[in-house]
Amino acid sequence: VDYAASKGAIDVFTIGLAREVAAEGVRVNAVRPGVIDTDIHASGGQPERARELASSIPMQRAGSAEEIAEAIVWLLSDAASYTTGALLDVSGGR
């Protein structure tokens, strides 16, 4: 419950802060990654966790750290200059 509550709080904070500072030219967005295949699972004793969860993801695979980074780079770019208050799901549809 605490994990879900903190995720919800970040969403609300992102949207609220974006509205508050938009007139100053400040953009506030959040990236919400899904299952990402990283070494963190191995350090937690579950090195195959991301691959095991792949069947529950509509795209049938875990994402990569590079895919998350690309989403962040886009949000930082001029291409996203009219984007604020966005909750960008990079989750393979999950």
Image: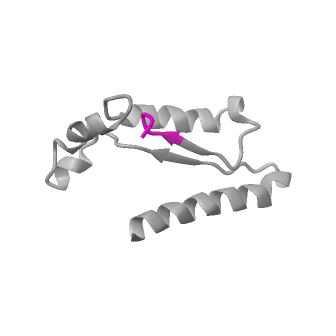
Quarter of the figure with the C terminus: top left
What residue is shown at x 76% (from left), y 37% (from top)? 82
Quarter of the figure with the N terminus: bottom left
What residue is shown at x 65% (from left), y 46% (from top)? 86
Residue 33, image x, y percentages: 44, 44
Q: Is residue 58 left or right of residue 23?
A: left
Residue 24, image x, y percentages: 83, 54
Q: Which colouring convention does the figure follow?
A: one colour
Question: Where 61 falls versus 9 (above or below)?
Answer: above
Foreground pick, 41 / 53: 53
Foreground pick, 15 / 76: 15
Question: Where 39 falls versus 23 (above or below)?
Answer: above
Residue 5, image x, y percentages: 48, 68
Residues rendered magenta in the picture: 89-94
What residue is shown at x 86% (from left), y 53% (from top)? 23
Q: Is residue 79 magenta?
A: no
What residue is shown at x 16% (from left), y 41% (from top)? 48
Q: Point out the residue furthest to the left here.
A: 45
Residue 74, image x, y percentages: 60, 32
Number of marks in picture: 0
Q: Is residue 93 magenta?
A: yes
